[in-house]
Amino acid sequence: MQLSRADVLDGAIEILDQYGLADLTMRRLASSLGVRPGALYWHFTDKQTLLAAITDHTLAPALDGCDAEQDPAAALRALAVRIRDALLARRDGAEVASASFAAGLSGDGVRVELTAAARAAGLTEPEASYAAETLLLLVVGQVLDEQTRMQMDSAGALAAGDSPLDDPSARAGTSRGADRFAFGLDTFLAGLLGLPAQRPAGAR
């Protein structure tokens, strides 16, 4: 049976979710699929393009919930929350996404949606573009911190009470990470959405 691009992607995600990014190598992936490493390069030119495909696959559910009729401020917040949820659902999701974004190989879909929502909220084209990039960095950075702490916690490397999942000051049903994210997101959006009101009358 011929190996498809979807087979390679599924196999890579399985290794990533089970063992983590450090153990996802092209050689290991090829071995798990029962092929020679060279067979993978018909579908992905290198590991970086494979990671970019994993990122796009991971973030696809976040884009499924976009609603063109939603209030722009609510749309920005909801999309940011969905991006966070999608990255948290994948082991080392933020680390994979960060590398793919930095290489310019992934993230176009979420950037387009974030930029469109920011423009609809009254921001200029340059402002909307910067807002999308900044918001994406805020989300990825927050998730990277959460996932790093979770890994340290699972390895017993955190002191008692430092677990990201155990915070007595967090709201019921939330974690320390969720509350920190909500505070940072709401603070950022409050400043961002106030920009149009700060412009002189008639300015665009």
Image (cartoon, grey):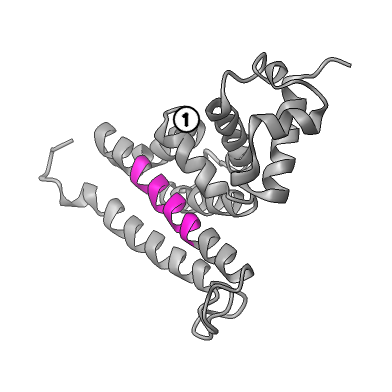
**What's the magenta bit mostly, secondary-structure-wise?**
helix
Q: Quadrant of the C terminus?
A: top left
Tell me which segment is drawn in magenta.
133-145
| Residue linked to disc 1 | 108
Q: Picture quarter containing residue 50?
A: top right
Q: Residue furthest right?
A: 1
Where residue 36 sits: x, y (%)? 75, 20
Residue in the image at 73% along x and 50% along y: 18
The answer to whether 148 is drawn above or below residue 18 in the figure is below
Residue 134 seen in this snapshot: yes
- Disc 1 is placed on an element classified as helix
**Residue 138 drawn in magenta:** yes
Establish if 149 lies above or below 7.
below
Q: Nearer the viewer, residue 58 or 72?
A: 58
Left/right placement of residue 113 relative to residue 87 reads left
Image quadrant where one finds the N terminus: top right
Q: Indicate the quadrant where residue 188 lies.
A: bottom left
Give the residue at the far left of this rendering.
200
Q: Looking at this view, is 157 or 196 the one in front?
A: 157
Q: Position of residue 49 (x, y in %)?
A: 55, 26
Identify which residue is drawn at 48% across, 55% down. 144
Q: Is residue 57 inside the magenta stretch?
A: no
- 9 left or right of 196 in image: right
Mark 1: amino acid: Asp
